[in-house]
Amino acid sequence: AQRVTQPEKLLSVFKGAPVELKCNYSYSGSPELFWYVQYSRQRLQLLLRHISRESIKGFTADLNKGETSFHLKKPFAQEEDSAMYYCALSGSTDKLIFGTGTRLQVFP
Amino acid sequence: DTAVSQTPKYLVTQMGNDKSIKCEQNLGHDTMYWYKQDSKKFLKIMFSYNNKELIINETVPNRFSPKSPDKAHLNLHINSLELGDSAVYFCASSLSGSSDTQYFGPGTRLTVL
C-alpha cells in the first residue's frame, strides 16, 4: 500500500534555529514526492517537489530511497515559515496521497 | 485572476439538507480534484476528473455526487447532509495527472448543524 507518514503533529522552534520536518513513505516503485504548505488563511500550495531539486524559501528536501524518506529542511527558521506542511506522494494510483501534516510554529 | 476558485467560501446548513459547492479553474488544466480536510487537518482525496471523465472515486458515500460540465468546472453536490460531513472541502486542478503540481482553491468550510 502507498502511504505517507509525518510523525510529528507539531514542531516548535525559535527563529534562527534549524528545522527538519520528517516524512517517510511506503511505495515499492519510483515515487514522485512533494511538499505542500498551507499558511494561515491561505490556500494549500506547492513548496517543492523532489524532481526539481531546488530550494524554495530556503527549504530543501532530499529523496532518500534507502530510508524511504523525504525530510524537509531549513537551516535557519523564520517566523513567516509558521504554517501547516504536508508531504505527499504520487505513485501508481494516479492520486496524490498526503501525510497527516506537521504544524510548524516559529517563535520570535 | 484567481487560478482555482470555489463558491461559497462558507456554508452552514441543517442536517438532511442538500447543498452544492462549485469549482472553476482558468489554468487550462485537464484534471480536477475534490479533497476533504477534516478537523484534524487530514487531507484526503475524494474524486478526480480528467477532461470531464471520472478517474478516481475514493470510497465516498453515494450522497456525494461530483459533476463536471466541462473540463474547467467540477462541482460537488451533497445530499442528505450529516454531521460528519462538516469539514473544509478543497478543489484542485493539475495539468494532466497527480504527478503534476496541483493548484488548490481557497476551500469551502461546510458546517452541518
Image (cartoon, helix red, strand yellow):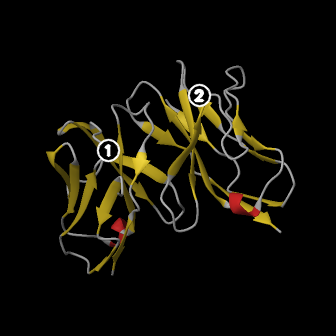
**Count the marks: how many?**
2
> Residue at label 1?
B27
In screen coordinates, is A32 left or right of B107? right
**Residue B80 coordinates in the image, percent (x, y):** 19, 69
Q: Residue A84, located in which quarter of the rendered image?
A: bottom right
Q: Residue at x 66, y 42 (%)?
A: A56
Q: CA distance from mark 1 to mark 2?
A: 21 Å
Residue A72 visible here: yes
Which residue is drawn at the image coordinates 51% and 55% (left, top)? B42
Compare residues B38 and A1 and report the one nearer the observer: B38
Residue A71 visible in the picture: no
The chain under label 2 reads: A
Considering the image in quadrants, where does the C terminus of chain A appear? bottom right
Q: Residues within 10 Å of mark 2 (few under 14, many from 20)?
A: few
User: Which of A12/B30 is in front?
Assistant: B30
Which chain is home to disc 1? Answer: B
In the image, which disc is placed on residue A52? 2
- Relative to residue B105, is residue A69 depicted above or below? above
Left or right, B50 with respect to B3, comes to: left
Farthest front residue in view: B1
| Residue type, mark 1 in image | Leu
Instruction: Tell which of A41 and B27 is nearer to you.
Output: B27
